Amino acid sequence: MGVMPDTRRGVLYGVAAYTMWGLFPLYWPLLKPSGAVEILAHRMVWSLVVVIAVLAVRRHWSWIRTITGRQFLLLALAAVAVSVNWGVYIYAVNAGHVVEGALGYFINPLVSVLFGVLIFRERLRRWQWIAVALGALAVLILALDYGRLPWIALVLAFSFGTYGLIKKAAGVGSAESLTIETLVLLVPALGYLLVLQANGTGTFGNHGLGHALLLVAAGLITAVPLMLFTASTLRVPLTVIGLLQYIAPVLQFLCGVLIVHETMPASRWAGFVVVWLALSAFTWDSIRSAHTSRQERTAALETV
C-alpha cells in the first residue's frame, strides 16, 4: 500500500517538471528587451545562486570531496552543451520559432537512440529502426518546407542528447551537477553581464523592478523543474518517464500554434505528423520491450 502513493507522487513531480518546461515559451518573451545571450547569462548566474541555496538548506556539501577530476571535466563539457541548448532555445522562442523549438524536443528521443547506435554500438529493434527512419524523413520534409535545414530543432535535439549522455557518464546528482555546470559558466556569464552594464547596453535594472525580478527568476525556473524531474526518476519506471517527456514539446507546440500564431502550412503539418508517427512507433516499442522484460524476469523467478 505504501508504494502507490510514492509512485503517484513521482508521476506528479514528472508532470510538474515537464509542464514547466513546456510553458517556457510564455516566459522568455517577458524578458524582452534583453537579448538571448544576456538572458542566458542571467540564467546561468541565478541558477547557481538557487542551487547553492538548496544545498545550504539541505546542508549537503560532503559531495564536493567525492568529485573526481574526470567527473569535473565531464560536467564542464556538459555545461558547454547545455549552454548551447539554453541559448538556442531562448533565441528560438524570442525570434518566433517556437514550433521549430518544439520539434527539437520531439525528436530528441530519436537522437538518443541514434547515439546508442553510433557511440555504444547498440543494436536496434525493428520498430526502433522504423522510428529513426521516419524521424529522418520528417526532417527532410520540414527542410523542404522551411527552405533550409531545421537547424534550431537539430541543434536543440543534439545538444540536449549530448548533455544527457555526458551527465549519465558523470554519474553526479542533479543539484550537485548543476552547481558545477553553472560554476564553470559563472566567469564568462558574469563577465559578459558586467561588460553590458559597464557600456550601458545591459537591461538589468534599466527596465523597472519587475523586469529585473523576472531575470533573477530565470534561475529559479531553471533549477526547480530539474530537481522535480530528478525526484520523479527516483520514484517511477523509465517507461513512465518516456511517456511524460512528450508533455513539454506538446505544450511548446500548442504555445507556438495557438498563442504565438505561427504559420503552419500543410507541408509543415505533414512533417510533424511523420514525427508523431515516429514517436508512436518508438513509444509502442519501448512499452512492449519493457513488458517483455518484466515477463521474462517473472518467469525466471518462478523457475527458481
Image (cartoon, rainbow, N blue to C red):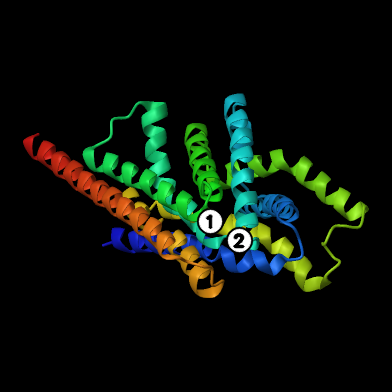
Q: Position of residue 275 (x, y in %)?
A: 37, 53
Asked if disc 2 and disc 1 are in contact, CB closer than 8 Å, the reply is yes
Mark 2, residue position: 93
Q: Name the secondary structure under disc 2.
A: helix
Q: Name the secondary structure under disc 1.
A: helix
**Residue type for callout 2:** Val
Q: Position of residue 268 (x, y in %)?
A: 43, 60
In the image shown, does 206 or 233 lie closer to the viewer?
Answer: 206
Q: Position of residue 149 (x, y in %)?
A: 52, 46
Q: Position of residue 229 (x, y in %)?
A: 47, 54
In the image shown, does 199 or 286 lie closer to the viewer?
Answer: 199
Residue 244 found in image quarter: bottom left
Residue with the most extreme left position? 303
Q: Residues within 10 Å of mark 1 (few under 14, many from 20)?
A: many
Q: Residues within 10 Å of mark 2 (few under 14, many from 20)?
A: many
Mark 1, residue position: 101
Is 170 on the left-hand or right-hand side of 288? right
Which quadrant would the C terminus be assigned to in this image?
top left
Give the alpha-carbon distance from disc 2 to disc 1, as whole Å: 7 Å
- Residue for point 92% across, 52% down: 198
**Residue type for callout 1:** Gly
Residue 62 visible within the image: no
